Image (cartoon, rainbow, N blue to C red):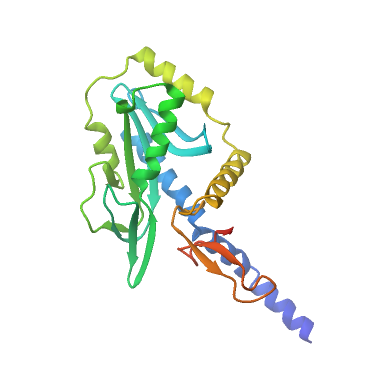
């Protein structure tokens, strides 16, 4: 009898588990980041002239301390635009010179790394890889999702399609057509091949760097890591670094 009831239950509700899995994936910082990058990629495809702005997406470059990943690069005669995407909800507070910014959702407050500082490293990696003047590189931050800026942001920190207007505001010629083709070729030569293996190695490099830093940043979502102590189990009393956005992000590092 019990077996029959269980069989009927499974037959009628077999779809619940896949739905739970899909919903869980949709809520992960990894998927939100991926969605943000996709939205920027699609909007650029329709709103930026492909003959003027040459896009390269998901670029991983080697750096002296490992690797760095760049969401989008747009190479044009007006400069090289390096775009970092952030998918956040709630109110966003921040300033150009602050090391961390704040996300506030109702009574919950979270800290995350200043994306301008994060993107600065991307610019330095491109400067070294392409051997171009640093002033020809333009940092652009794009927030997507249901977020609102509650403090005045620099003009290169934009929301949704605002980054298109910012990029198009530059009109001084910096590169010739031949130089643009050379730069595009260099990017393809210097980048690591896009693959799951490249992504895994990049995360390992981040974790290795963070383990040796007193200030730690989450390798998955970019938020601050917090030093915590295990309260129970065989590892009780041991310390570890946990993401400050727990439970939204469950990334941890061993202390």
Residue visible at 74% across and 77% down in the picture:
7
| 56 horizontally vs 173: left or right | right
Residue furthest top as drawn: 178
User: Which residue is rendered at x = 78% and y = 81% of the image?
Assistant: 3
Front residue of this view, candidates 72 and 52: 72
Which picture quadrant has residue 117?
Answer: top left
Judged left or right of residue 16, residue 174 is left
Q: Is residue 47 left or right of residue 202?
A: left
Q: In the picture shown, does residue 137 fall above or below 40? A: above
For residue 89, say whether it is visible.
yes
Looking at the figure, which quarter contains the N terminus? bottom right
Q: Is residue 131 above or below residue 32?
A: above
Quadrant assignment, res 121: top left
Q: Residue at x 33, y 73 (%)?
A: 107
Residue 200 in picture, x, y percent from top left: 61, 44
User: x, y percentage for residue 106?
Assistant: 32, 71
The percent position of residue 84, horizontal first and vertical second, equals: 39, 42
Residue 181 location (% of width, % of height): 42, 17
Q: Quadrant of the C terminus?
A: bottom right
At 61% from the left edge and 64% from the top edge, which residue is drawn? 18
């Amino acid at each position: 009898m019990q077996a029959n009831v269980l069989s009927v239950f499974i037959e009628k509700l077999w779809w619940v588990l896949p739905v739970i899995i899909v919903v869980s994936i949709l809520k992960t910082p990894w998927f939100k980041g991926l969605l943000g990058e996709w939205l920027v990629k699609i909007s650029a495809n329709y709103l930026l002239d492909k003959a003027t702005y040459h896009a390269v997406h998901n670029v991983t470059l080697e750096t002296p301390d490992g690797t760095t990943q760049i969401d989008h690069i747009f190479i044009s005669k007006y400069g090289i635009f390096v775009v970092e995407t952030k998918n956040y909800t709630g109110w966003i507070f921040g300033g150009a010179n602050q090391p961390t910014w704040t996300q506030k959702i109702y009574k919950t407050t979270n800290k995350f790394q200043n994306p301008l500082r994060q993107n600065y490293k991307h610019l330095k990696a491109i400067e070294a890889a392409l051997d171009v003047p640093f002033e020809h590189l333009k940092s652009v931050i794009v927030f997507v999702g249901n977020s609102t800026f509650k403090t005045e942001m620099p003009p290169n920190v934009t929301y949704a399609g605002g980054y298109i207007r910012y990029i198009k505001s530059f009109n001084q010629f910096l590169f010739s057509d031949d130089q643009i083709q050379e730069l595009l070729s260099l990017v393809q030569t210097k980048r690591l091949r896009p693959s799951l293996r490249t992504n895994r190695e990049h995360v390992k490099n981040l974790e290795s760097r963070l383990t040796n830093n007193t200030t730690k940043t989450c390798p998955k979502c970019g938020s601050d890591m917090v030093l915590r102590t295990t309260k129970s189990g065989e590892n009780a009393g041991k310390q570890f670094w946990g993401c400050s956005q727990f439970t939204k992000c469950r990334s941890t590092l061993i202390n």
